[in-house]
């Protein structure tokens, strides 16, 4: 049986005893149905992980004993930022979850001309918190010990005003260049993907003026979540750690 990996948002120390956060304790005790003496792996998102053993479990608390830190990392050599136009329903959740599994470093949710989701105020805060939970769950599942950064929601116009670090790519099925035509000189990449309906002509022009290059993924028009993940897999396969 695979040893469960649990995110602990506070500092972790060698040979220490600590109580898990209430939501993690409920998950371990009620969903995973682990008991005293069972093993866990804890990580706090800052790198490294800690083997641990459940030493006390009751209705209110779950205590574990951490062992010595293990320097275990599976981060990609590519530093990829996914600047993703916010999509509706569970499409955005799916994109974030799989992007984490594919080694993304930073996720930037964007408002674009064709975005159909309006997020403001309390609703926005709840959605960002939900997306953080998606990131944590994906890291628990795939073995990553460093949490990708979730940037605040911003407009594409504001995002394009920031200096571009490394290579900038815009997914565009009209582009002539595919992934195999790209130069492998950069290990830092920003991938810009539109929401349902894609980016407008004006947005594509603004991205080009900001230094982004159009990239196509073949002859078919892909859904936003399919396009983002296909591009990430292609980049990781070519220059990263897939293959």
Image (cartoon, rainbow, N blue to C red):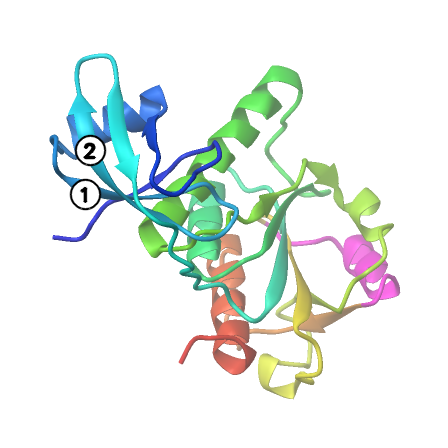
For disc 2, the neighbor class at 10 Å (few under 14, some 14 to 19, many from 20) is: many
**Residue assigned mark 2:** 54
Q: Position of residue 32 (x, y in %)?
A: 16, 35
Seen at 31% across and 28% down, the residue is 24
Residue 164 on the magenta segment: no
Q: Residues within 10 Å of mark 1 (few under 14, many from 20)?
A: many
Q: Which residues are magenta?
A: 197-211
Find residue 126 and name its label. none
Classify 118 as above or below 145.
above
Q: Are marks 1 and 2 in contact (CB under 8 Å)?
A: yes
Magenta stretch, overall SS:
helix
> Where does the C terminus fall, quadrant-wise?
bottom left
> How far separated are the C-alphas under marks 1 and 2?
6 Å
x%, y% of residue 95?
47, 50
- Is label 2 in a helix, a strand or a loop? strand
Lower position in the chain sequence, tag 1 or tag 2: 1
Q: Is residue 207 magenta?
A: yes
Q: Which residue is rendered at x = 35% and y = 35% of the image?
A: 16
Q: What residue appears at the point 55 percent right and 74 percent down from the top-left corner?
A: 235
136 on left or right of 17: right
Query: Which image quadrant is residue 164 in?
Result: bottom right
Q: Position of residue 119 (x, y in %)?
A: 63, 26
Taking the image as shown, residue 227 lies to the left or right of residue 121, namely left
Q: Please give the residue where the numbered disc 1 appears in the rendered image.
A: 39
Quick check: 40 left or right of 73?
A: left
């Amino acid at each position: 049986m695979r040893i469960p990996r649990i995110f602990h948002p506070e500092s972790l120390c060698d040979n220490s005893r600590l109580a898990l956060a209430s939501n993690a304790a409920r998950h371990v005790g009620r969903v995973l149905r682990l008991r005293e003496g069972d093993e866990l792996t804890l990580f706090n998102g800052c790198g490294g992980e800690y083997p641990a053993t459940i030493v006390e479990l009751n209705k209110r608390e779950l205590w574990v004993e951490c062992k010595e830190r293990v320097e275990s990392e599976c981060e990609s050599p590519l530093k990829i930022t996914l600047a993703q136009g916010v999509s509706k329903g569970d499409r955005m959740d799916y994109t974030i979850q799989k992007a984490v599994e594919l080694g993304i470093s930073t996720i930037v949710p964007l408002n674009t001309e064709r975005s159909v989701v309006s997020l403001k105020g309390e609703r926005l805060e709840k959605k960002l918190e939900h997306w953080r939970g998606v990131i944590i769950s994906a890291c628990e599942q795939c073995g990553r010990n460093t949490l990708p950064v979730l940037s605040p929601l911003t407009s594409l116009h504001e995002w394009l005003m920031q200096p571009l670090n490394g290579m900038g790519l815009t997914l565009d099925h009209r582009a002539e260049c595919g992934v195999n035509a790209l130069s492998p000189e950069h290990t830092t990449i920003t991938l810009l993907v539109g929401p349902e309906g894609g980016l407008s002509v004006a947005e594509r022009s603004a991205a080009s003026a900001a230094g982004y290059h159009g990239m196509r993924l073949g002859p078919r028009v892909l859904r936003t979540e399919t396009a983002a993940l296909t591009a990430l897999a292609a980049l990781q396969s070519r220059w990263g750690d897939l293959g």
